[in-house]
Amino acid sequence: MFLKIYGEVSELITAKNKDEKSQELADLMILLLDYADIHEIAIEEAIVNKMKINEARTWAANELGVFQHVK
């Protein structure tokens, strides 16, 4: 499954327009939701919990302008 996810990420990176990006992002999300289902992970709960953790972190943009936590 991770190779398939990797493949979809690769397709998303090389997508040329908004429609292609949208389709590839949808494919990626479907795979991630399938993974959560297979492993009996309550993804909604996991996201809420992770957002709480992220809210408590300090964030800064790296040299590419991508935000990442620094603490």
Image (spheres, rainbow, N blue to C red):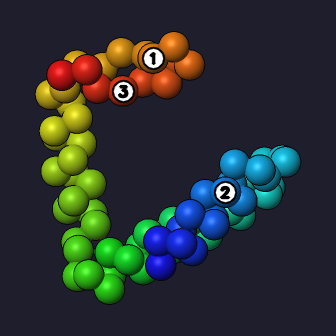
What residue is shown with label 1? 62
**Residue 18 in the figure: left or right of residue 27:** right
Label 3 residue SS: strand
How crowded pointer 1 is (Cα within 10 Å; few <14, some 14-19, many 20+) is rated as few
Amino acid at circle 2: Ser
Residue at x 32% of width, y 75% of height: 36
Label 2 residue SS: helix
Residue 50 visible in the current orientation: yes
Of the pair 63 and 20, the residue shown nearer to us: 63
Amino acid at circle 3: Gln
**Residue 59 in the figure: left or right of residue 52:** right
Label 1 residue SS: loop
What residue is shown with label 3? 68
**Residue 39 in the figure: left or right of residue 16:** left
Among the 4 quarters of the image, the one containing residue 11: bottom right
Residue at x 77% of width, y 50% of height: 14
How crowded pointer 2 is (Cα within 10 Å; few <14, some 14-19, many 20+) is rated as few
